[in-house]
Amino acid sequence: MAQPTPAATTGKVVEPPQRQRFEWIGFLQKFGVFIFLILLILFFTSQNPRFLSVRNLFNILTDVSIYGIMAVGMTLVILTAGVDLSVGAILALAAMCGAGAVKGTGESRSETPDPHKFGGLSWLIALVICIGLGTLAGYIQGKVSTKFRIPPFIVTLGGMTVWRGATLLIGSGSPISGFDPGYTWWGNGSFLGVPVPVLVFLVVAVSGYIALRYTPYGRHVYAAGGNPEAARLTGLRVDRVLTSVYAIMGCLAGLAGFIQSARLSSAEATAGLGYELTVIASVVIGGTSLMGGLGGIAGTVVGTILIGVLLNGLVIMNVNPYYQQIIIGIIIVLAVGFDTYAKSRRGRR
Amino acid sequence: MFPLERMSDDLLLKVDRVGKRFPGVVALDDVSLNVRRGEVHALLGENGAGKSTLLKILAGAQYQDSGQIDFDGKSLGRELPHERQRLGIVTVYQEFTLMPNMSVAENIFIGREPVRGKFLSWPTMIKEARAVAAKLDLRVDPLTPVYALSVAEQQMVEIARALTMNARLIILDEPTAALSDREVEKLHQIARDLKAQGISIIYVTHRLGEVKQVCDRLTVLRDGKYAGEADVKDVSIDQIVRMMVGRNVEYLAGEHHQGGEVVVRVENLTRLKRLPGSQAVPLRGITLEIRRGEILGLAGLVGAGRTEMVRVLFGADPFESGQVYFEGRAVTVSSPAEAIELGMALVPEDRKQQGLFLTHSIRMNLTLPSLKKFLIPPFFIDQRAESELVEQYRKALSIRMANQEVIVGTLSGGNQQKVILARCMALKPKLLIVDEPTRGIDIGAKAEVHQLLRQLARNGTAVVVVSSELPEVISLCDRIVTVKEGRITGDMPAREATEEKLMQRMVLAQGEQHVQVASPTA
């Protein structure tokens, strides 16, 4: 009779230290990547003061903007506990079709561009086609995955090959290049001193941030990823949410394809090869959980910039490019490892 | 009932005044259980009586806080589950623990594979699997994958595994819940054979007819306490039922109200096919009316089909035939989203798995389905209106929280349940379904939840309560429907209901074959 009482008191004594630890972990989980980014910037600046110049910072941002635009969409996808491996392929397909529409896929593909063709609005046509096609491709994948209950990993793995093949088919294997200045402005121009790709990235990231935090849709994404069964019983149409997330991802991959083709003044069948991994890496480094339901755009932006800073800084320090890959790989594993560790800490009641 | 001392050398297992507490709940309080060598011993009790906790302690999955367990004359310590198995205590769980894609032989010997050097010895494994299968009259090839077997055969594989471990005490946790009558008969035969070989069996079941058929003695648990033991031949089924339910009523008897007009009418709802990947019980011709302002209780044992009924009504699971009428109109409800649009809301059975977004804030959890009510066009959430809503329900339900951003997973069970209730109430439903509303929450919170549900009913909501606790059902509800094996077996006003009457209808409904067989002998 007397025995249960001490057992109950010990239970209470054990709890408080766990709770203190939980906040510490929570803090690091929230701001850890950001702190790491600041430290990295300080380190590279100490190695080479020019690292911190406005020009170099814009270089970094321009370099990562293509990844960044897609990483915003990938954040939504990963929040629903899914993944999209097809983004690089959709980027290439969208760019190829957009470019093909304004320049043709035949003989005319490498002619000097005519700035007055389509009343100078060739960029708009390409943009609409890129975005529309990307959205469609993403929508199809989302629909197939939810309708037939095939894991998104598989559907987008298949999609990756299908879209890449379609790109080769449409472009007959060779690039379409040479766009008019109105088109290439989207890749190389600047507005108020800020490179256009960076502005586009900014707009996309801010929209994504607002959508996730301040709209019902954002809540639905978190809910569908955090606990799909609870979401369904709360009246969400979970399948619709999931499909929409892949459509948005495709849309942003298309937009990224447009910017990339404008930047290179060329649409190539091999464009975006392997981008999916970098994009997933930025999201994961930014603290979004692959299990779904936890994370956000702010982390993703930091994660994207972190990858850019690393790449740029290592180049400035003249680090052998092979080492660069090794370093980035290790950082991804560390970030996810920490994330899992923090979760397991939090998971205890 | 008999002098224990004289029997003590006969005892294989002696559980002596074992206690176990979990935060906020006493699961076992001075429970004793004495199992003799070579007997089939029934362990009985309502849902939540403490049987599962006791089984887990015996298996070594948990340890008691107090009390003593002796096995074969030796005191048990803190052995791990596999060490307990090596001692000879083997549990065959209700949910099978087999690997569906592996063969019968592999499953029988998993973790203890016969080897030659570093490699599996398939010939030995197959030979021994055949031998043990023959003992159990299990006629399948040892190389058949387990998924190809019937439920009964899978159970035999589990028992075969127990036998090859040289089990001396086999614990069968509701072994017949999923079996057909013929298979049950076969299982009983095997239990008798094992007994003849000197193996003891603890037999957990809800079917009292079975107790009469195969068991020698029985022990009853009630509310985590020892409620008595007896020789099966000395007691009638009525007496057993009384042992199981005869507890002090801890609830205030509420006033019982008559319902108003019919909100939902369910006609002949049937689903006989199994749902893929679920243990859901088939539903056989459910017909039911739920009225405005009444609290309707669905009483039944676990696995009776209560949860299945409300899930079908709410559009969470499909059904094959039948018709639902909502406020007189025939409706099709094929998803929870549609049910909510009609004016239903559900507090699901499993708070954590089906109800909450554990890693998210109270605010997010509470307002999720109501967000469209306070939209700033075109699509922004009116944060102030949202906070006000949360605040309103925090007050109304006295949810204890530091602020709205607190993560739901850190709240107590009672407060979590209130968050889900608040979420449903914010939808202003015409029909509120609550599945096990007070499971795992403390007494104080229980009373508060009851009060809330009564208030809702008084304001005209139709409330359906699924509960395994009979006293709760009797005191809270206005009308009680009993369910057994996917059928409705009784419907009575709560003021006429007693625990005995309900329990009778929950375990002994007409068409219960084992009872019919057993009754003459009783």
Image (spheres, coloured by chain):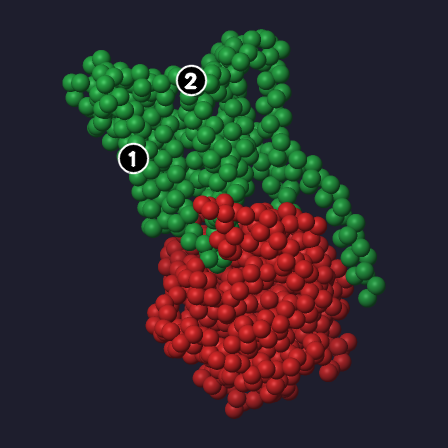
Residue B499 sits above or below residue A123 on the image: below
Q: For this view, does A31 lie left or right of residue B342?
A: right
Q: Which of B502 and B176 is in front in this view?
A: B502
The residue lying furthest to the left in this view is: A107
Quarter of the figure with the N terminus of chain A? bottom right
Looking at the picture, how far across and down is residue A308, in whole percent?
Answer: 50, 20
Camera sees residue B217: no
Label 2 marks which chain's residue? A
Location of residue A264 (image quadrant): top left
Colour in which chain B is drawn = red
User: Dividing the picture into quarters, in which one does residue B254 lie?
Assistant: bottom right
- Counting labels gives 2
Q: Residue at x 51, y 29 (%)?
A: A301
Kind of residue sitting beneath label 1: Leu
Q: Earlier in the sequence, mark 1 or mark 2?
A: 1
What residue type is disc 2 on? Ser
Label 2 sits on a secondary structure element that is: strand
Rendered residue at 79%/61% (across/down): A4
Residue nearer the viewer, A83 or B148: A83
Left or right: A94 as drawn, with respect to A56: left
Dot 1 corresponds to which residue? Answer: A133
* C-alpha distance separating marks 1 and 2: 26 Å
**Residue A83's quadrant in the figure?**
top left
Q: Which of B81 and B30 is in front in this view?
A: B30
- Residue B244 lies, in percent from the top left, at 64, 79
> Residue A190 has which mark?
2
**Chain represented in green:** A
Q: Which residue is pictured at 43% across the width and 77% down the height? A: B265
Q: How dense is the environment of label 1, judged by Cα within 10 Å: few (below 14), some, or many (20 and up)?
A: many
